[in-house]
Image (cartoon, rainbow, N blue to C red):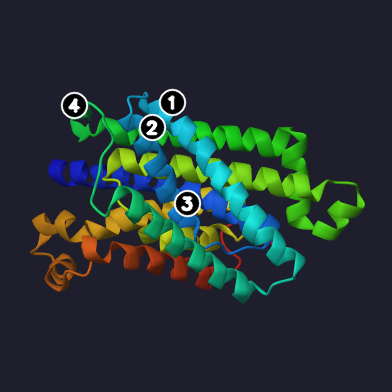
């Protein structure tokens, strides 16, 4: 039982770590939808771009934390460039949601292939010393995963303060609730749009950089997370940043625990239910994303609007 408990806690910690990364990036995705009504399928590739910019700065000898900060600045610049060249002209032309989705997929492919052209298609890692795992109550937890969780907590706290206690945060919430009403009350919508991309780009770059701390940096790392990102946004309530955070954590924990369920139950193979799960091998790492999406479907069957009220 001690081994079972230790393995279960390990999976939960892994889930919180992955969920923290998903949550941060999902906040950026839900903000762009809530305020700009844009379902951005290039969001995962902006995560990847953030990780590669961190890799670039770190490779020339800059401290990893400064590299992550610089990466966020450059990634925000790229998102603002995409706003100037793509999204703003499309809004003026009143492009349909389908058109915007197709454009975002094209942008995702452009970014991914640009990364492959510049950095190559192989796995790369930050230039970091190997740190010993921390032993907490007899459970070994990689130090980088603890860092990821702490970084996510700090970023979420900063986001909460910005949304609740600053003028731009209140303006963003007003625009998300009712764009026309916000405009008539004198809110500078264009300024809100810029700040939306600044916040979304920063959180997305941070999420990608954090993902690079716990796994290899590769061109498709963000693309593989696009389904969990959208699942988190939908589960939490589309357009609600706090819902995206909750949804990200739920998806992260569900997929890690679900993906390790077969190994977790191996000591109980004599139990009929556990034996069936082990024999079918459906709850292994190959199916962990499917398990997380199944959790989302089950929750939405009970609560179609998501866990929190979203943007209609």
Q: Which residue is mark 1?
A: 66
Q: Earlier in the sequence, mark 2 or mark 4?
A: 2
Please give the residue where the numbered disc 3 appears in the rendered image: 46
Who comes first in sequence, dot 2 or dot 3?
3
Q: Residue at x 39, y 36 (%)?
A: 54
Look at the image and tell me whether residue 310 can be seen.
no
Label 4 to label 3: alpha-carbon separation: 31 Å
Residue on which disc 2 sits: 57
| Residue 312 vertical position relative to residue 2 in the rendered view, above or below | below
Q: Residues within 10 Å of mark 2 (few under 14, many from 20)?
A: some
Callout 3: few (<14), some (14-19), or many (20+) C-alpha neighbours within 10 Å? many
Q: CA distance from mark 2 to mark 3?
A: 17 Å
The residue tagged 4 is 132
Q: Answer yes or no: do the residues labelled 2 and 4 have beta carbons within 8 Å?
A: no
Q: Which of 213/148 is in front?
A: 213
The residue tagged with tag 1: helix, strand or loop? helix
Residue at the (62%, 42%) spot, across then down: 198
């Amino acid at each position: 039982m001690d081994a079972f408990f230790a393995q279960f806690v390990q999976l939960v910690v892994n889930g919180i770590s992955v969920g923290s990364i998903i949550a941060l990036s999902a906040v950026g995705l839900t903000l762009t939808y809530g305020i700009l009504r844009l379902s951005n399928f290039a969001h995962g590739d902006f995560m990847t771009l953030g990780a590669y910019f961190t890799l670039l700065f770190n490779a020339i000898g800059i401290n990893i934390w400064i590299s992550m900060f610089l990466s966020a600045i450059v990634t925000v610049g790229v998102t603002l460039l995409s706003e100037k060249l793509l999204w703003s002209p499309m809004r003026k032309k009143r492009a349909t949601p389908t058109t915007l989705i197709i454009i975002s997929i094209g942008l995702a492919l452009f970014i991914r292939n640009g990364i492959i052209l510049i950095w190559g298609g192989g796995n790369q890692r930050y230039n970091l010393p190997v740190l010993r795992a921390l032993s907490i109550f007899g459970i070994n937890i990689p130090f980088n995963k603890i860092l990821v969780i702490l970084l996510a907590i700090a970023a979420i706290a900063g986001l909460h303060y910005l949304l609740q206690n600053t003028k731009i945060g209140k303006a963003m919430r007003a625009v998300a609730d009712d764009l026309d009403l916000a405009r008539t009350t004198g809110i500078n919508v264009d300024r809100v749009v810029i700040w939306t991309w600044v916040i979304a780009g920063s959180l997305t770059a941070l999420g990608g950089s954090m993902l690079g701390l716990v796994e290899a940096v590769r061109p498709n790392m963000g693309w593989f997370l696009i389904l969990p990102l959208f699942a988190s946004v939908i589960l939490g309530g589309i357009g609600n940043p706090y819902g995206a955070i909750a949804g990200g954590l739920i998806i992260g924990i569900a997929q890690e625990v679900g993906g390790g369920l077969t190994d977790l139950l191996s000591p109980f193979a004599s139990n009929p239910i556990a034996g069936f799960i082990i024999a079918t091998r459906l709850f292994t790492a190959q199916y962990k994303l499917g398990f997380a999406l199944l959790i989302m479907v089950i929750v939405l069957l009970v609560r179609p609007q998501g866990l929190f009220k979203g943007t209609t």
